[in-house]
Image: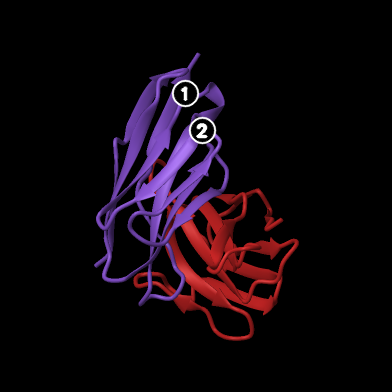
């Protein structure tokens, strides 16, 4: 249980184009999903919190007009990198929050990540 | 500001050689401390959540413990398939459910 998928697993695009990444919770519903970014040899940095049916909350320093987040359903959140540039090249990972069976607290389960390369 | 520091940055063990990874943290209000395993090019895989000092959890060769200042991930008789980066993260009770990650410990277990 608690499987999260991402699509695509990797993408290469030209500078100035936009790229959409999908994050799906496959066997549970998630009112809250999170988007992280990970640069080589670095840890995960939270970019934004995605709430179903409402606007995303962005972390300080993350441009909301550049990284568009849409959480249109309880199983799908999308991240669109608009006008991508080489410095946006990174590993983008989403997570979805749910409560495991038998637990009294929520846990975040992560997707497999999307490798974005901007030429 | 919340801080998570993991040590060592890298650890090389021989198969069967037990050791511990450290996660020191500073947080204004701890909702939970999480351990994840991450293989190269993949997303983190959930291992444990610890909520209060004194709590311990075990899964196969792994055991996680928690004090008010740090957490340890003990690896008993590791196997090569335990090689991965182990990430520690804290969740602040005043900041929703976002996770603040440490930089991780890269573990290599050689046969």
Quadrant housing residue A104 = bottom right
| Residue B41 at x, y percent in the picture | 55, 40
Q: Which chain is red?
A: A
Q: Classify mark 1: residues with Cα within 10 Å, few (<14), some (14-19) or many (20+).
A: some
Q: Classify mark 2: residues with Cα within 10 Å, few (<14), some (14-19) or many (20+).
A: few
| Residue B17 at x, y percent in the picture | 40, 20
* Front-most of residues A59 and B36: B36
Q: Which chain is purple?
A: B
Q: Which residue is mark 1?
A: B77
* Front-most of residues A103 and B102: A103
Q: Kindly tell me whether residue B69 is visible in this rendering.
A: yes
Rendered-image quadrant of the N terminus of chain B:
bottom left
| Whether residue B1 is situated above or below residue B18 in the rendered picture | below
| Residue B2 at x, y percent in the picture | 27, 64
Distance from the alpha carbon under mark 2 to that under mark 1? 7 Å
- Left or right, B30 with respect to A82, comes to left
| Residue B12 at x, y percent in the picture | 38, 23
The colouring scheme, among rainbow, by chain, secondary structure or one colour, is by chain
| Whether residue A43 is situated above or below residue B108 in the rendered picture | below
Residue under the image location 46 percent in, 18 percent down: B16
| Residue under disc 2 on the same chain as residue under disc 1 | yes
* Front-most of residues A80 and B108: B108
> What numbered label is drawn on residue B61?
2
Residue under the image location 25 percent in, 55 percent down: B69
Residue under the image location 43 percent in, 32 percent down: B75
Looking at the rendered structure, the secondary structure element under dot 2 is: loop
Residue furthest to the right in view is A27
């Amino acid at each position: 249980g608690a499987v999260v998928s991402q699509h695509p697993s990797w993408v290469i695009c030209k500078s100035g184009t936009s790229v959409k990444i999908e994050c799906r919770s496959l066997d549970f519903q998630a009112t809250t999903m999170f988007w992280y970014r990970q640069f080589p040899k670095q840890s995960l940095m939270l970019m934004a919190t995605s709430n179903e049916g409402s606007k995303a909350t962005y972390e300080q320093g993350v441009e909301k007009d550049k990284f568009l987040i849409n959480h249109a359903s309880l199983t799908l959140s999308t991240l669109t990198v608009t006008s991508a540039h080489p410095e946006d090249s990174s590993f983008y990972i989403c997570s979805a929050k749910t409560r495991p069976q038998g637990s009294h607290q929520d846990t975040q389960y992560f997707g497999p990540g999307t490798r974005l390369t901007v030429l | 500001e919340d801080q998570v520091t993991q040590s060592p940055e890298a650890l090389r063990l021989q198969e069967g050689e037990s050791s511990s990874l450290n996660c020191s943290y500073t947080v204004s209000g701890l909702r939970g401390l999480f351990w994840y395993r991450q293989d190269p090019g993949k997303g983190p895989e959930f291992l444990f959540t610890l909520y209060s000092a004194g709590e311990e959890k075990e899964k196969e060769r792994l055991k996680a413990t928690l004090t008010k200042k740090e957490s340890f991930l003990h690896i008993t008789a590791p196997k090569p398939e335990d090689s991965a980066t182990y990430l520690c993260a804290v969740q602040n009770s005043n900041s929703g459910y976002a996770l603040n990650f440490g930089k991780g410990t890269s573990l290599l277990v050689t046969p």
